């Protein structure tokens, strides 16, 4: 739980704050028409962070960070016969090594994603004010304007599915590694690539099912 | 001891014996119990009687030396935490590593890793000890220490030990009954004395491959 979740807080925080800031400044830069109210910047930042950036893009980043770590850890255990040592002791090695990682990921990733949403919106607020592209009142009006709580539930459903993929796909590739150090690297790469593709595919499917 | 060239099938045979590889035909008997016909509980009972020393030690990187030795005790016994620690310390002292409890495998030398692996293998007082190339990657002096340790433990605890190796020094040091595997077949079997005098071509090619052994042959 600690290595998979708490260890990712830093990277998630940095990326979320800066993405929130960039989305705020870019949106304000593009909303030059007098027909678009200034609070639309806050609406855009809120919806971008909650609907897509935090659940999907942060999950893609976590797939790279956590996924490669899981695949290489389990792959190394395979090639150094540590998994054989577990089997000799009558332990179901897949259950012993993989299930706790899936549980940790599914339990902790939603916390990371909520943290990311909060920091992204906060980052947009702070940097939007500092850059002078939006006022205090306009931004807060925007992030509260016609807020749909279901969007957060939708994001957390996606996060749960992505969290399962982030732990299980690299674990599978690590577990079935054959060979040596080179193959561990390959398993790690495969795990991250397949997880990323599956996250994008499930993002589309879940969006279609839950939002349309 | 099971000897043979690299790729001849020694490790595969060992993994079949301990149940890590599925077998296509034949049977693996432990005191008359066919391992592959047993249910989960039966297999677990046999695994309780097996200690295994892997080629690279196969110590769990995330656990300390003591935790590595305690691990099989947690799996197979109902001992209390303090009893498990006492047993682990006893086993570590037996392999001459009394002060390594809190170290991690990454902090150990190759020889120390092998000794911790032996301590872990004997922690549950096995009836059978399987060793997969215990000397691989070790210098000659450390190899002899490991060989002697395996021999001492085998005699001391009265266990059956099967060692896989292609190191003829080990065969001469600690071998009793020797099986020579060639291209996956049980090619030759006999005692240490017999293997040094056999005229079987494949066995001779293997046994007398080094200058040292050729010199030894001239003195026999």
Image (cartoon, coloured by chain):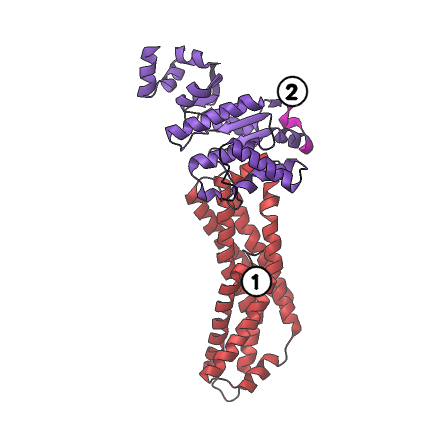
Chain colours: A red, B purple
Residue B43: x and y in percent read 65, 30
Q: Quarter of the image containing the C terminus of chain B?
A: top left
A55 versus A89 height, above or below: below
Residue corresponding to mark 2: B32
**Crowd rating for badge 1 (residues with CA inside 10 Å; few <14, some 14–19, many 20+):** many
Q: Residue at x 64, y 28 (%)?
A: B46
In this view, the residue in front, A17 or A172, is A17
Task: Name the residue nearer the viewer: A165 or B70.
Answer: B70
Q: Do discs 2 and 1 share a chain?
A: no
From the viewer's side, name the closer residue of A194 and B89. Answer: B89
Chain letter of disc 2? B
Q: Tell me where residue B146 appears, x and y as whole percent.
A: 45, 28
Residue appearing at x 54%, y 77% in the figure: A44
Residue B100 image point, x, y percent: 49, 40
Q: Is residue B7 visible?
A: no
Q: Label 2's element?
A: loop
Q: Residue A32, position in %: x, y?
A: 47, 85
Q: Chain of mark 1?
A: A
Image vertical order of residue B83 relative to residue A49, above or below: above
Crowding around mark 2 (Cα neighbors within 10 Å: few <14, some 14 to 19, many 20+) is few
Closest to the observer, A188 or A148: A188
Residue B4 falls in image quadrant: top left
Residue B162, above or below A110: above
Residue A206 lies, with reference to residue B93, above or below; the image says below
Q: What residue sits 65% from the left and 23% below the top? A: B33
Q: Find disc 1 in the rendering and name its residue.
A: A203
Q: Is residue B109 visible?
A: yes
Magenta stretch? B31-41
Q: Is residue B111 magenta?
A: no
Nearest-to-viewer mark from 2 and 1: 2
For the residues labelled 2 and 1, the Cα–Cα distance comes to 56 Å
């Amino acid at each position: 739980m600690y290595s998979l979740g708490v260890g990712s807080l830093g990277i998630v925080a940095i990326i979320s704050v800066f993405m929130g800031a960039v989305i705020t400044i870019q949106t304000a830069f593009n909303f030059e028409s007098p027909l678009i109210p200034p609070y639309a910047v806050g609406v855009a930042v809120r919806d971008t962070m909650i609907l897509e950036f935090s659940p999907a893009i942060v999950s893609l980043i976590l797939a790279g960070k956590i996924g490669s770590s899981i695949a290489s850890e389990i792959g190394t255990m395979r090639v150094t016969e540590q998994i054989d040592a577990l089997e000799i002791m009558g332990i179901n090695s897949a259950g012993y090594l993989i299930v706790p990682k899936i549980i940790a990921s599914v339990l902790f990733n939603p916390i990371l994603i909520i943290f990311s949403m909060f920091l992204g919106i906060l980052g947009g607020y702070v940097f939007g004010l500092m850059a002078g592209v939006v006022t205090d009142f306009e931004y807060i009006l925007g992030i509260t304007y016609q807020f749909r709580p279901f969007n957060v539930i939708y994001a957390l459903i996606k996060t749960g599915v992505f969290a399962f993929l982030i732990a299980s796909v690299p674990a599978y590739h690590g577990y079935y590694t054959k060979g040596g150090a080179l193959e561990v690297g390959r398993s790690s790469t495969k795990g991250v690539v397949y997880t990323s593709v599956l996250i994008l595919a499930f993002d589309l499917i879940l969006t279609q099912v839950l939002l349309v | 001891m099971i000897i043979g060239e690299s790729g001849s099938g020694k490790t595969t045979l060992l993994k079949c014996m301990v149940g890590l590889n599925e077998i296509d035909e034949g049977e693996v008997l432990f005191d008359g119990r066919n391992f592959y016909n047993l249910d989960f509980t039966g297999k677990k009972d046999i695994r309780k009687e097996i200690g295994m020393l892997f080629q690279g030690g196969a110590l769990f990187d995330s656990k300390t030396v003591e935790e590595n030795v305690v691990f099989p005790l947690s799996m197979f016994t109902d001992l209390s935490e303090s009893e498990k620690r006492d047993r682990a310390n006893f086993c570590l002292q037996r392999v001459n590593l009394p002060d390594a409890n809190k170290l991690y495998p990454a902090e150990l030398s190759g020889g120390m890793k092998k000794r911790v692996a032996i301590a872990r293998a004997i922690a549950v007082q096995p009836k059978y000890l399987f060793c997969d190339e215990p000397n691989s990657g070790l210098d000659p002096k450390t190899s002899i220490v490991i060989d002697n340790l395996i021999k001492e433990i085998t005699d001391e605890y009265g266990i059956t030990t099967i060692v896989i190796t292609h190191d003829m020094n080990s065969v001469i040091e600690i071998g009793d009954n020797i099986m020579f595997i060639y291209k996956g077949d049980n090619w030759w079997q006999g005692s240490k004395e017999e293997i040094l005098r056999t005229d079987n071509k494949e066995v001779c090619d293997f046994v007398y491959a080094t200058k040292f052994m050729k010199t030894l042959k001239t003195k026999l």
